[in-house]
Image: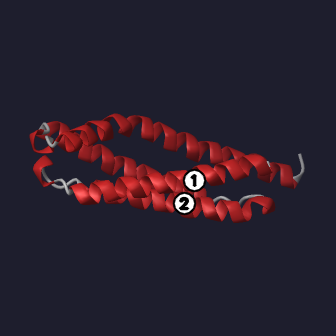
Amino acid sequence: MNKNQQKMVHFSNVMQQVMGGTEAEQDLLNPKFTALRKAIDAGTIADFDPQEYGATKQLFEDGTEKYGELLTTLANTTPPARFIGTHKLLISAYRDFVAGCQAMTDSLKDSPAQLDQAAFDAAEKAQDAATERIMTQLSKITRIA
């Protein structure tokens, strides 16, 4: 295998690691997010079980930390030359995704009744927009490869 092929294999492996880790974390967090979203939408967030809320908040904090680690991994890899621009856009989108996750985590105050719904909603929109940008860049990488 020549140097360019080795670089491509390494880049591909890092991409699989980051996106696989992201998907695994989302699978873990999504049920907790869905429970919060349902309570917010139903207007019953103040009645949310405090222990479950605390566990959810901790899970969100841990998940955001994990996403930050995946961002570092993504940012520290060197792509093959033809992917440099797309890779930079992917890093930017992933950084925005992590910021949205942090904003959502920050919206979870000490108790369910204190949840900052406006910040939670804004963070959800930011994450959705960043996820769309991530998917666009991944699609470009797949087409180029």
Q: Is mark 2 on a helix, strand or loop?
A: helix
Residue found 56% across the figure and 56% down from its top: 133
Answer above or below: position of 94 versus 47: below
| Residue 44 figure quarter | top left
Location of residue 48 by image quarter: top left
Counting the numbered discs, the total is 2
Proximity of marks 1 and 2: CB atoms separated by less than 8 Å: yes
Q: Which amino acid does label 2 sit on?
A: Ala
Left or right: residue 66 versus residue 137 is left
* Element on which disc 1 rests: helix
Q: In this view, does 119 lie to the left or right of 136?
A: left
Q: Position of residue 127 (x, y in %)?
A: 43, 54
- Disc number at residue 44? none
Q: Name the residue under label 1.
A: 134
Instruction: Where is residue 138? Give x, y as percent.
Output: 65, 49
Q: Report x, y in % for residue 27.
A: 43, 35
Instruction: Specify the farthest residue to the right.
Output: 2
Q: Position of residue 7 (x, y in %)?
A: 78, 53
Residue identifier under label 2 = 93
Task: Tell me which label, 1 or 2, sits earlier in the chain.
Answer: 2
Residue under the point 58% across and 61% down: 91
At horizontal 30% and vertical 54% (from top left) the residue drawn is: 121
